[in-house]
Amino acid sequence: MTMIKVDHLAVSYGQGDSLVRVVNDVSFEVSEGETFGLVGESGCGKSTVLGALAGRNRQWTGSIRIDGETIGQKRSISQLAKQQMVFQDPFGSIHPRHTIGRTLLEPLEIHGKDNRQERVEKALKDVGLPLNFRYRFPHQLSGGQRQRVAIARALILEPRILLLDEPTSALDVSIQAEILNLLKDLRDREKLTYILVSHDLAVVAHLCDRVAIMQNGGFVEIATKAQLLAGTVAHPYTRVLMDGSRGYVASKRPVGVAAS
Amino acid sequence: MTQDPGTPMTKSGYFADLHNWLINEDFTSTKQARLHKAYVAWLSLLANPLAFAGFAVIIALIVIAALAPALTVYDPYSQDLTMALKAPSASHWFGTDEFGRDVYTRVVYGARTTLYISILVTVIVAPIGFVIGASAGYLGGWIDVVLMRITDIFLSFPSLVLALAFSAALGPGIENAVIAIALTIWPPIARLARAETLTFRHADFVVAAELQGARMGRILLRHIVPLCAPSIIVRLTLNMSSIILTAAGLGFLGLGAQPPMAEWGAMAAAGRKYLLDAWWLTTIPGLAILVVSLAFNLFGDGLRDILDPRNA
Amino acid sequence: MLKPPENILTVQNMSVEFPTLSGVVTAVRNVSFSVGREKVGIIGESGSGKSTVGRSIMRLQPPQAIVKADRLQFEDINLLTAPEEQMLSVRGRRISMILQDPKYSLNPVMTVGEQISETVILHERVSRKEARQRTLAMLERVNIRDPQRVFDLYPHEVSGGMGQRIMISMMLIASPSLIIADEPTSALDVTVRQQVLSILDDLVTERNLGLIFISHDLNLVRSFCDRVIIMYAGRVVETIAAADLDDAQHPYTRGLLNALPSLDHPRDRLEVLRRDPAWLEN
């Protein structure tokens, strides 16, 4: 079943003379339970696509259907709960003066949910944080723990879709592994659909079933995970990004001295 | 948990337990988290002697104002012309004025007037300044332009002149002085609230709340207020001295508190006719104004360090 | 592993301590290594002390920090005892530092050309005209196509990759013998990173310099450097030739390698690093 259907999406910023079109005619479909990746370098428009899906960027044309519903520029409260976003910077995405419990209660109050205390406890348990963390302030938590709180806040409204904007790029490798494992477990358990934005093809290939490679506001190709792992991608730009995730490739002249 | 070596560890029994409970960051309730924050703020206030001195003076001012009748033996208003212009002595610590009233008693009662004016002005100004500034910063566009130009108009007058004009128009009296001072104090608060709101307007946690459907009122009250509050509180504390000075100035010019009310500025003004013969009439209220304004400034300065969100 | 023939820098038992309210925090503990004419990578997670090592070598640690070492020798200079005046001539001239974001390292109100020429004039006492010539040549050397135009640009007018190339040219124009690069490419995109690294690579090889490359990116250090020093909680846990990294012995290094998602060795679940308190015993 199709969870997200995007047709001819174009997103722009500004108006009049300063109008900049950031995303140009992008179409894709994501089915329920699938993880779809958006990869590219800074300024390619990958976060803008995510922002349009989340309801953050309102200046778009084309059509977006989420869970069978056509989405307009303005969303109803139930449409907003369908998808939730996890941000890149775990230090900036949680209110510094709210306790973790307050942060998690906030969406429940907005949406008028009942059994708030139980829901907060369940959300903390789901992301593997101890229950007494609800009384803590963000500055008492490490980056990885904060990112878990951000995921808990996104999950507490029981969305069908998580929009992940570089969720691990600010974290250390070992913490990144924990968060990626957590995201995988949550997806399998809650039947979530993910859209993952990243600049790191290795991270995307680890989590995603299909990946759109973006450049200058458009897709250059949509590759499957199998294609990425087998290296049978069609577009040379995808290959450049793949090499980039492997590290440095000495250009032109051969290096044979490294292992002396 | 690590202990702060600067805090008294040797205290035994209940106080040590309380200290440990307060300093411990493994909170088990929201109440403990709040008390912890207050306790840490208290410890950092203790670590800053100047700010603490300011704090102590302010507390003393409040106590004096509250207990004024108990601290004095004379009536601040009853005149006794036989006792006029007596120099400071054991029975009249700060001497008497031209109507034979005890200056010490009037200074003590004057603390009430000063507190009354500064608290009333603050209570009026803080919400107005915040609502105007935060709305302008959050909504942007033409609302921002209109609100900020209105603010600019108020800002472009020298505050004492503006206060003078208002109290002249409204008529003398302490309530009118409060309104006049409030009208001159709110624009900087609004500017500050707008600037603070702009820094957090596009923070990820605000966007997250918006994407979850939070409306403007909720975002301003729940998300922006806790972040703006420290700098606005600091600014208001630092403003206290200018409120006190403006109030004294208005009183001095005869536009604020009206006789026979005990008000420091009015007392200093009344005393200037006898400046050469009875120095205490102007000096004592003047010193009171100086000490209290200085205390508010020192405390505000220390508060800035304590409340700075970057320390959190 | 072969010992490099000539050591530019020798660090023996260096510790860096920060006195704080709750006692002394040891950011770096008993670190020893040496750098020859090679590319040495220092890798570690945030808080491992890797950047503190780089700064302490330059004597740029915060003033309250206490640096102790048995030996801290850079060529003929004892960095532990050298007076501050001597350090002024060492910094920038003989040891250069490249930081993560050129936007913060360049003076925003001077054109990039002026800033580079300034370095030349300061260190070599040449005329303004000659300094300009040298600067243009250096800008060309870091593959900037139109050096005349770039010379007159202000830092905010250049892109991240161009900015980092300008930093490299500024750091190399005084012909230092050691470069400390602290996360020089973390703010750059993949394709730009390749260009910047290959310029750095060429210059290090061509001028026979020593390079300390501080990074959190295992793949990058592995493919770029000759040797890798792995730091954990202020300690060096392992030093290994980059090519042999897959045979690393220390469980922390192995844990880091296994925690990394990889296109070449896909895994269903990433291994989670288990931190062993025994690693902290030294």
Image (spheres, coloured by chain):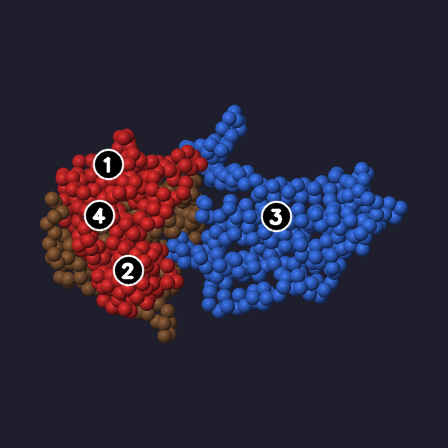
Chain colours: A brown, B blue, C red
Q: Residue furthest bottom?
A: A17
Q: Secondary structure at mark 1?
A: strand
Residue A19: x %, y % from top left: 35, 71
> Which residue type carries mark 2?
Ile
Q: Mark 2 highlights which residue?
A: C166
Instruction: Tell me the SS state at disc 2.
Output: helix
Of residues A94 and C107, which is closer to you in this image? C107
Q: Residues within 10 Å of mark 2 (few under 14, many from 20)?
A: many
Q: Which residue is mark 3?
A: B296
Observer-nearest of C144 and C238: C144
Task: Name the chain under label 1.
Answer: C
Q: Position of residue A101 (x, y in %)?
A: 42, 44
Distance between mark 2 and mark 3 Cα atoms: 50 Å
Q: Which residue is mark 4?
A: C210
Verify CB contact (< 8 Å) between mark 4 and mark 2: no
User: Could you say which quadrant of the image residue B188 lies in?
Assistant: bottom right
Disc nearer the start of the sequence (1/2): 2
Q: Are marks 3 and 1 in contact (CB under 8 Å)?
A: no
B271 or A143, which is in the foreground? B271
User: Residue at point 67% right, 49% down?
Assistant: B290
Against B140, residue B74 (above or below) is: above
Mark 4 crowdedness (10 Å alpha carbons): few <14, some 14-19, many ≥20: many
Task: Name the mark nearer the viewer: 3 or 1.
Answer: 1
Query: In whole angstroms, how far apart are the C-alphas of marks 3 and 1?
Result: 54 Å
Residue B15: horizontal and vertical position, in percent?
53, 28
The chain letter for the residue carrying disc 3 is B
Binning the other alpha carbons within 10 Å of mark 1 as few (below 14), some (14 to 19) or many (20 upward) gives: some
